[in-house]
Amino acid sequence: MPRKSPAKDRQSAVSSAKTDSVSLKQLAAHLNLSTTTLSLVLNDAPSAVSIPQETKDRIFSAARELNYRPNYLARSLRVQRTHTLGVIVPELSDGYSAMVLNGVEAVLSTQGYFYLTASHLHRDDLLKQIPQMLTERQVEGVIAVDTPMRFEPNLPTVNVSGHEDVLGVTNVILNHQHAAELGIGHLFNLGHRRIAVIKGQEFSSDTDVRFETICEAARKRDIPIDPKLTVQLQGDSPSPELGYSAMKTLLATGEKFTAVFAFNDVSAIGAIRAVEEMGLRVPGEVSVLGFDDIYAAAFHNPALTTIRQPLFEMGSLAARTLLERLSNGHEALIPEVLSVEPTLIVRGSTARVS
Amino acid sequence: MPRKSPAKDRQSAVSSAKTDSVSLKQLAAHLNLSTTTLSLVLNDAPSAVSIPQETKDRIFSAARELNYRPNYLARSLRVQRTHTLGVIVPELSDGYSAMVLNGVEAVLSTQGYFYLTASHLHRDDLLKQIPQMLTERQVEGVIAVDTPMRFEPNLPTVNVSGHEDVLGVTNVILNHQHAAELGIGHLFNLGHRRIAVIKGQEFSSDTDVRFETICEAARKRDIPIDPKLTVQLQGDSPSPELGYSAMKTLLATGEKFTAVFAFNDVSAIGAIRAVEEMGLRVPGEVSVLGFDDIYAAAFHNPALTTIRQPLFEMGSLAARTLLERLSNGHEALIPEVLSVEPTLIVRGSTARVS
DNA sequence: TCGTTTTAGTAAATCGTTTTAGTAGTTATA
DNA sequence: TATAACTACTAAAACGATTTACTAAAACGA
């Protein structure tokens, strides 16, 4: 499929070799100084006070002139810090991970940290290999997103929406109980009594807590979730297709309900399609409640009522927490759980039961 | 907002220090062998033929037992290869970049490569700094996505949807002319003659080619795009909001049109909302054509007719191209342009003009 | 038996930094 | 006038691997 433009091929741009990097040693030779002196001056070490400003200036200007760029590998090897984290996600294009990563990066980039990303695709072999590879590459810590802990955390780890209680791992989670209260409360207040639930995939970290808290919130209101009204997402595509299929199976049972609480906005969008294909109106005959508040939620038809998860904030919180732990060395207290609050966003996909 | 669970704080998991890494030197000492021998054996170097199998086994089992993990920094420093690329994107959560990255990663992960991601957020300072920082970190090459080349590529570079003709940079692009033909052709065949166009943001690499090829395709059919029927996206959020605002301004002019060709699916979704708020039906009174074919496109109401861009393939093509160039050393021919083909996906948001 | 190969390794240099522990020469202090 | 303190630097070790250039002993060949 890729089409080369053959007439336009060119020889390697050897000209750019001009900018090839100078080492500290070369720079030192060029200045008739030792690498020690250069290093002290360039890093503004305390012991550089005795170096006269004139020499410093010579060094700085030569460094600029020869375009000296310190080799981070060498430096990291020596100082035993890489300023690099590892980030493990299920996959990149699922929206959820991307939003969290955005928050992670916003923090890291201001602190001079970079990160290596790896997707586990829910594959067990990758879940075990990736942490090892990241360790070999000397990352200082790991941020995992919606990732089961199939490995022993030999590195400081923060797991976003992790629910396993692993020693040394901080879980950043949503206040699920509150989320369930908001969601079920909203539907209840609109008069819904028979509420269907689309559970997340088996491998998704939030699936169980989410379902349990929803059941609990419903029970409290004396409208327990009927097992016959629950379906589970199958497969791991980030497409609304999964929600569509799940809803189709539920509708095929013929059970009656007036509202659906979907696992996320993406599946809610799929569910709406399935409901409408049955000739039912959303929200007229069926209310649909989403989760996450992705960008598309507000602009879907009908606009999605949803429980907002502050994904960006969860990412940045994870990053801040990990960096703090790294800078505090090993005396740091490791919080087991950091929780953030959901928000109910009421839009057009839910309505009073008629 | 983050709430600590104070009673649950724990002291640092010192126990995990057990798994702390052994160096090759320590392993060698433990075996009463030199690091040379270990290195030769562990890397299966040709000169290791003279080492008896028994010794090799001893080495392997000790390595496993003591959980030896080679330090990638040290190795990279010595062999002068990091097996790491840099990836530059506008921002992570915009869907487009995430899809491309997905393709990039699919290739890199099979080749033992990792990558460092950096977002430039369309900021000029970052566009200059990021390549330098990546260079310092000794990445072997750079994959840029929708990124203007504000820097001299001193590293092998592949730019996905790059349109600048820079020496040493391979641009992976969509066949825009074909895309425009598909889009305008489709609308034309449905009887549309006055077609509005939502241009991309000024900073978006594809904006100009896309607009020009669309105009060209329209002119060829004697239905030139009326400048009064073009609007441009403003701002850089990945939300449909931008398309919504753009469409609002266009509608406010009172100009008549029967179809809109949007810059991407996200803005098309926003545009649909604006159109419907005016009391016009999509596709009854206005057809809307998107671009990209994001996951949500098929499930929007109405389902989006769109020009599919093979973003995953563009990412993997970029990665393959770069890796090939790296392995061929400097004798490699550098293709200037690699182009991929779009596909027209007809769904419900376009219809015959009535 | 003597020289050559092969076997089974090792010492030391190297990658590019940082950092420790200096050293001359000068200036201040007792 | 010693000596302590400061100034302006540097040599060498270290980080943890790989790689080049060896060596000592055993086996082989003529």
Image (cartoon, coloured by chain):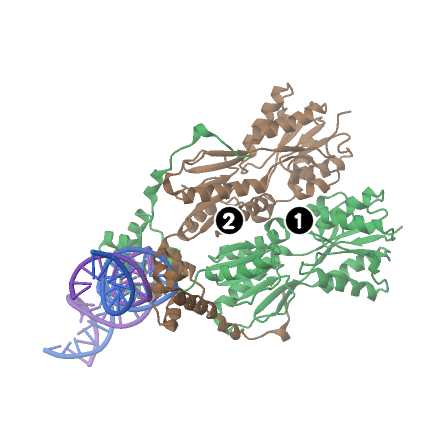
Chain colours: A green, B brown, C purple, D blue
State the image coordinates of residue B103 (x, y, percent, origin top left): 56, 45
The residue drawn where x is 49% and y is 40% is B159
Residue placed farthest to the right in the image?
A354
Can see residue A43? no
Report x, y in % for residue B179.
60, 30
Q: Determine the chain carrying the residue at label 1.
A: A
Q: Amino acid at mark 1?
A: Pro
Q: Quadrant of residue A39?
A: bottom left
Q: Which residue is mark 1?
A: A238
Q: Quadrant of the N terminus of chain B?
A: bottom right
Q: Chain of mark 2?
A: B
Residue at (72, 27) in percent of width and height:
B258
- Residue A245 is situated, as x and y percent measured from the top left of the image, at 76, 48
Q: Secondary structure at mark 1?
A: loop
Examine the rendering and report whether any part of residue A210 can be seen. Answer: yes
**Residue B108, numbered circle:** 2
Of all residues shown, which one is farthest toward the top?
Answer: B222
As helix, strand or loop, the secondary structure at mark 2 comes to helix
Front position in the image: A171 or D27: D27
Tell me which corner region of the image, top left, top right, bottom left or bottom right, holds residue A307.
bottom right
Looking at this view, is B201 or B344 the one in front? B344
What whole-number distance in Å separates the C-alpha atoms at marks 2 and 1? Answer: 21 Å
